[in-house]
Amino acid sequence: MEILIEAILDVLKLIPFLFISFIVMELIEHKLNNKSKLKKINKFGPLAGSLLGLIPQCGFSVVGSTMYAARVITLGTLFSIYLSTSDEMLPIMIANQTDIGIIMKILFTKFILGLFFGVLVDIVYRSKLNNNINDICEHDDCHCRDGIIKSSIIHTIKISLFIFLVNLLLNLIIDKETLTIFVNNNKILSPILASIVGLIPNCASSVLITELYLEEIIPFGSCIAGLLSGSGLGLLILFKQNKNIRENIIILVSLILFASICGIVLNFV
């Protein structure tokens, strides 16, 4: 029952983000038909993504995944959101009365790295902005012609049910004690292992990484590595909504590489 309630609460937290993101996408589809306008907006995408990702919970990583699947935002913006997202890190640190200096150091580090890699990805990889959600609409059979609100509600309900089922399954199988043994304090290996744990599409990963750092079991760099790759349910939604599986795998591997390299460097700095 406890696991069931936790899964329900996790979904309820995300529903407002999902609904707003689909409303925005529908408005873009119906009102903003000029791709040049989207390109101008997306020039500031990595900056906005890095800032929004700092907000607790993984709502904006879910929104980012959905909007990238429709090619409303660039790949660099998506990376900025993923890398700056900390999920449950901030609430856990506040609950533990962690020194404000440590909290700000982590948030600032994630913001800078998210912005840097977001801009870098956009320079290297020029995303094609389709400015439509036709593929998603066809897949969800949302009846977009019936109105923006109705189609957004249908999208939100379907994604919420998917998140609930997967989250329930993850809550049943995740064993924090096993994961704790998996992550060690080696300056080189630890960030790599932490970044892999961070990929788990569940708040348990960010909670575990944060607690291990606060208990001084893992060093700062390893904590950052786990929090950089930890985008909550964002990756889960990406794999569901974005039909380019090869691209999804590249994004996932890139997150591990970015997070691991940054974590290793920070451990030695």
Image (spheres, grey):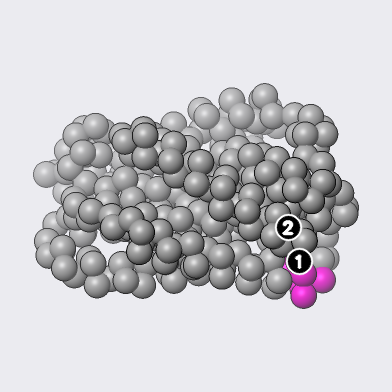
Q: Quadrant of the N terminus?
A: top right
Tell me the SS state at disc 1: loop
Residue linked to disc 2: 221
Q: Position of residue 106 (x, y in %)?
A: 69, 66
Locate residue 30 relative to residue 200 in the image: left or right.
left
Residue drawn at the location 29% of the way across and 39% of the way down: 154
What residue did someone put label 1 on? Answer: 269
Horizontal side, residue 20 vs residue 177: left or right: left
Q: Who's the residue at 28% across and 58% down the image? A: 126
The answer to whether one can see residue 226 in this image is yes
Q: Is residue 251 above or below residue 243?
A: below
Which class describes the residues within 10 Å of circle 2: few (<14), some (14-19), or many (20+)?
many
Q: Residue at x 23, y 67 (%)?
A: 39
Q: Amino acid at mark 1?
A: Val
Look at 73% across and 57% down and name the residue there.
221
Answer with the quarter of the image where residue 21 lies: bottom left
Q: Which residues are magenta?
A: 99-103
